[in-house]
Image (cartoon, rainbow, N blue to C red):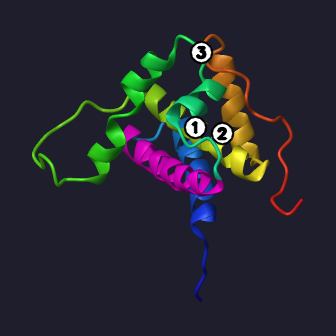
Amino acid sequence: MKVEINKFEAAKRNIQAAIRMTFDEYDLVPVHTVAAAANGVLWEWAKKKGIETTLDQAWAKIIRPGYEKEVAKFMLRHANFFKHADKDPDSSIELPLAEANDMEILFAISRYQDLTQAATAEMGIFATWMRWCNPDMVMPFYKAEPRSLSE
């Protein structure tokens, strides 16, 4: 039996998988790769829709002023390293911090909400957990009531 999904559905499932893997304390590398894949698809989709296409715009909604450099330092360098071997195939990198994965997931959730005005229960739990764990850094962006895409 053949089952088809579109890229948007794949991104949603990747976000949910990354959330579950995070709470299960799964290996940091696949968590980062799955979350970054979701974020990449949603980033491209948002660009096509004209929604928050710059990193600064996205960060301004989620990260409190003054924390941008701290977040950038641990978030932006791992995704390409894990996906590509065309430059320095024998190189190595430090494992991503769990916080980098958490932020990657949080940005994916934010983009998903921007595009759908909806969220899954997992997304709501994760966004609430991140806000609770990082009240000084993470702004309350999550819309509290999950809705289905058909509403």
Q: Quick one: quadrant of the N terminus? A: bottom right
Residue span colored magenta: 28-49
Judging by the rendered image, the residue that carries numbered circle 2 is 110
Mark 2 residue element: helix
Mark 3, other Cα within 10 Å: few <14 / some 14–19 / many ≥20? some
Most foreground residue, 18 or 23: 18
Task: Evaluate if marks 1 and 2 touch, with contact meaning CB atoms under 8 Å apart.
Answer: yes
Residue that extends furthest to the bottom in the rendered view of this protein: 1
Nearer-N-terminus badge (2/3): 2
Question: What residue is shown with label 1?
Answer: 107
Report how far apart the C-alphas of labels 3 and 1 lie in the structure.
13 Å
Whether residue 116 is visible: yes
Which residue is more in the foreground, 110 or 124?
110
Instruction: Give the answer, above or below, for where 97 lies relative to 134.
Output: below
In the image as oriented, which residue stretches furthest toward the right?
151
Residue occupied by mark 3: 137
SS for callout 1: helix
Q: Residues within 10 Å of mark 1 (few under 14, many from 20)?
A: many
Q: Residue at x 9, y 46 (%)?
A: 90
- On the image, the x and y values in percent for residue 39 come to 52, 47
Main secondary structure of the magenta stretch: helix
Q: Alpha carbon of mark 1 to alpha carbon of mark 2: how far?
A: 5 Å
Q: Position of residue 31 (x, y in %)?
A: 45, 44
Residue 135: percent from left, percent from top: 66, 13
